[in-house]
Amino acid sequence: MPGHLEELIGKINGSCNDNSNKITCVIADENMGWAIGVAKKMGIPQASFWPGLAGLKALILHNPQLIKEGVIDDKGKNKYLT
């Protein structure tokens, strides 16, 4: 995959006459860290993220609702798994 991404970026950036359509950064899921390596190799700014954090944040924000609806108790015990 890294070789294909590097080739794709090269083709896109090589065919652009102006900077408005060039790939100027790479943002990749941390599970695809090789994409960050390709960006570094090509001198393109990069950033990574872990989508699991968004899921964890959503769970934490919904804990009060889960307790209110009786799905879990105030100690986090799930009544459906007992």
Image: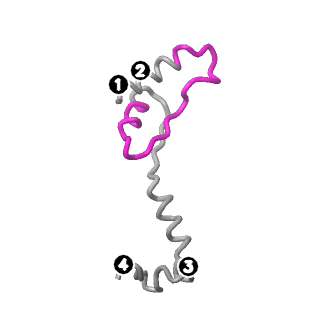
Q: Quickly name the residue at label 3.
A: 64
* Residues rendered magenta in the picture: 13-40
Q: Earlier in the sequence, mark 2 or mark 4?
A: 2
Q: Which mark is residue 3?
A: 1
Q: Quickly name the residue at label 2.
A: 7
* Residue type at the position of mark 1: Gly
Q: Which quadrant holds the N terminus? A: top left
24 or 59, which is in the foreground? Answer: 59
Mark 2 vs mark 4: give the one in front.
4
Q: Position of residue 34 (x, y in %)?
A: 35, 36
Question: How far is mark 1 from mark 3, CA to CA?
Answer: 47 Å
Residue under the image location 58 percent in, 16 percent down: 16
Q: Are marks 2 and 1 in contact (CB under 8 Å)?
A: yes
Residue under the image location 39 percent in, 30 percent down: 38
**Residue 36: quadrant of the picture:** top left
* Residue type at the position of mark 3: Pro
- Mark 1 crowd level (few <14, some 14–19, many ≥20, 10 Å Cα): few
Q: Quickly name the residue at label 4.
A: 81
Residue under the image location 35 percent in, 24 percent down: 3
Mark 1 vs mark 3: give the one in front.
3
Q: Position of residue 82 (x, y in %)?
A: 35, 83
Q: Is residue 23 magenta?
A: yes
Q: Earlier in the sequence, mark 1 or mark 4?
A: 1
Q: Are marks 1 and 3 in contact (CB under 8 Å)?
A: no
Q: Earlier in the sequence, mark 1 or mark 3?
A: 1
